[in-house]
Image (cartoon, helix red, strand yellow):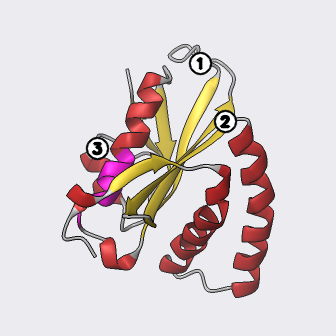
C-alpha cells in the first residue's frame, strides 16, 4: 500500500473496467450504510447495461485511481442533454458521481486528485458548471474545491 497519492496514477476507465466501476458503486452505497443486498445486486445488474451503452457513446466518462495495476478509487461524469439556460448555452449538463476510495487508501488526497481530473476534463469540454450530490463524508472536499452548497453542490467553471 502506498503512503500517499504521489504514487497513484489516474487513468480513464474503459469498457473492460465496468466490473470495477460496479464494485466501487456498490461499495460507495455500503459505506453510506445502505445494506439491502438484493437492491444492491439489482442496481449492479441494471447499471452494467447502462455503463456499456453510455461509456460507448461517451455520455458516461469514468476515471480510476490505481496503485500499480490495482484500482483503489474512482469517479465519473455523466453528460446529459439539457435545455439551454441564459448562463449556459451548451445544452449539456455535467454531473459527477460514484466518487469512491477504498477504505485503506482514504485521507491521502486521492479523491481530491480524482475530482481535479474530472473538473479539468469538464473545463476542457467547455461545460459551464458541474453538479454533484455530496455525502456527509465528501462535503468538506467538495467545498474546498469551490462547490457551493445549495439544494445541489455546484461549481462554476467559467
Magenta stretch contains residue 109: yes
Q: Earlier in the sequence, mark 3 or mark 1?
A: 1
Provide the residue designation for mark 2.
Answer: 58
Observer-nearest residue: 60 or 7?
A: 7
Q: Nearer the viewer, mark 2 or mark 1?
A: 2
Q: Tag 3's secondary structure?
A: loop
Q: Nearer the viewer, mark 3 or mark 1?
A: 3
Left or right: residue 18 compared with residue 131: right
Vertical side of 16 occupied by 87: above or below: above
Q: Tag 2's secondary structure?
A: loop
Provide the residue designation for mark 3.
Answer: 145
Q: How many marks?
A: 3
Left or right: residue 117 compared with residue 18: left
Q: Which mark is residue 85?
A: 1
Q: Which residues are magenta?
A: 108-115
State the image coordinates of residue 137 (x, y, percent, origin top left). 36, 68
Amino acid at each position: 500500500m502506498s503512503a500517499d497519492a504521489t504514487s497513484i496514477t489516474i487513468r480513464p476507465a474503459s469498457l473492460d473496467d465496468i466490473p470495477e466501476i460496479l464494485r466501487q458503486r456498490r461499495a460507495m452505497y455500503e459505506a453510506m450504510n445502505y445494506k439491502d443486498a438484493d437492491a444492491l445486486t439489482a442496481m449492479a445488474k441494471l447499471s452494467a447495461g447502462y455503463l456499456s451503452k453510455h461509456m460507448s457513446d461517451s455520455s458516461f466518462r469514468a476515471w480510476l485511481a490505481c496503485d500499480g495495476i490495482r484500482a483503489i478509487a474512482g469517479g465519473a461524469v455523466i453528460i446529459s442533454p439539457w435545455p439551454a439556460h441564459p448562463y449556459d448555452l451548451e445544452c449539456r449538463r455535467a454531473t459527477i458521481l460514484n466518487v469512491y476510495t477504498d477504505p485503506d487508501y482514504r485521507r491521502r488526497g486521492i479523491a481530491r486528485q480524482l475530482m481535479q481530473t474530472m473538473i479539468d476534463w469538464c473545463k476542457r469540454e467547455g461545460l459551464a458548471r458541474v453538479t454533484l450530490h455530496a455525502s456527509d463524508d465528501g462535503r468538506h472536499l467538495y467545498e474546498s474545491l469551490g462547490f457551493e452548497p445549495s439544494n445541489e453542490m455546484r461549481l462554476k467553471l467559467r
